[in-house]
Image (cartoon, rainbow, N blue to C red):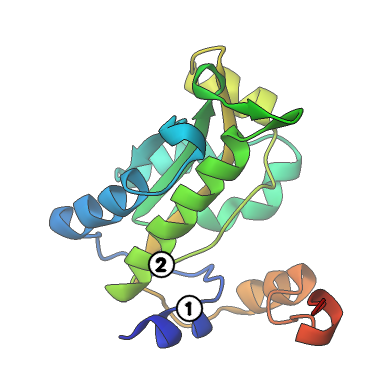
Amino acid sequence: MDAKELIFGRHSVRNFLPDPVPEVVLADILEAGRLAPSAQNRQPWRYLVFTDNGKIQKLAQNCGLVGLSIFFIRKAPCLIIACADTKSNVRINNQDYYLVDTAISFHQMMLMARSYGIESCWLAAFSEKKLRGYLKIPESWRIVAMSPFGYPAEKSLYVKAISSFAGSNERKALGEIVQFL
């Protein structure tokens, strides 16, 4: 799959086959994140990887009230939580870069996954406080996002409804977001 097909065909997937993500593929996905650019090469990203479905189901119950909308992650064969270590932050012109750096890294992982036919769904609907307590992560870490990873399955009625609510297929026209100066 070429870069254009990889990027233009990317979309949020919320229903997965139970097939596991092969270890060699998962290694490439994680390596793609590791190789991402970051401000002053600080590499603030830290990843928590879940491949045990029982642990993913338990995690889904610990995402807080707002996290109830993402209970579809329970069926994912792999879930990755993207964290940023604020100790590795760079601050330039009063702007912290740990969130941007981690987002770039995580997106590279999603594109690498897609190159193997593995889809994902960027999620931020969780209580960071509740999830932080459950995961017992270091104080300096922030939870940036999470995503299920897996081979896509047919959309269920629930998945169609949640995708519609999320506006997943709606994109602004280039004229709304680009200005040539």
Q: Name the spot of residue 38 as percent of width and height, x first.
A: 47, 41
Looking at this rendering, what residue extends furthest in the top direction? Answer: 139
Query: Of label 1 and label 2, which has the lower sequence position?
Result: 1
Q: Residue 27, percent across and down?
A: 20, 50
Question: In the image, what residue occupies the spot 58% across and 23% down?
Answer: 132
Q: Residues within 10 Å of mark 1 (few under 14, many from 20)?
A: few
Of residue 31 and residue 162, the one placed in the foreground of this image is 31
Amino acid type assigned to the residue bearing label 2 in the image: Leu
Indicate whether 29 appears above or below 91. below
- Contact (Cβ within 8 Å) of mark 1 with mark 2: yes
Q: Which mark is residue 34?
A: none
Q: Residue at x 78, y 71 (%)?
A: 165
Determine whether the residue tagged by mark 2 lies in a helix, strand or loop.
helix
Horizontal relation, residue 173 to residue 142: left or right: right
Quarter of the picture holding the N terminus: bottom left
Q: In the image, what residue type sits under mark 1?
A: Ile
Q: How many marks?
A: 2
Query: Which of the 4 image quadrants contains residue 111?
Result: bottom left
Residue with the most extreme right position: 176
In the rendered view, would you say 143 is above or below 74? above
Residue occupying image coordinates x 61% and y 38%: 99
The numbered disc on residue 7 is: 1
Measured along the vertical axis of the image, is residue 4 above or below residue 81? Answer: below
Examine the image and state in which quarter residue 152 appears.
bottom left
Q: Of helix, strand and loop, which one carries label 1?
A: helix
Left or right, residue 124 beside residue 154: right
The numbered disc on residue 111 is 2
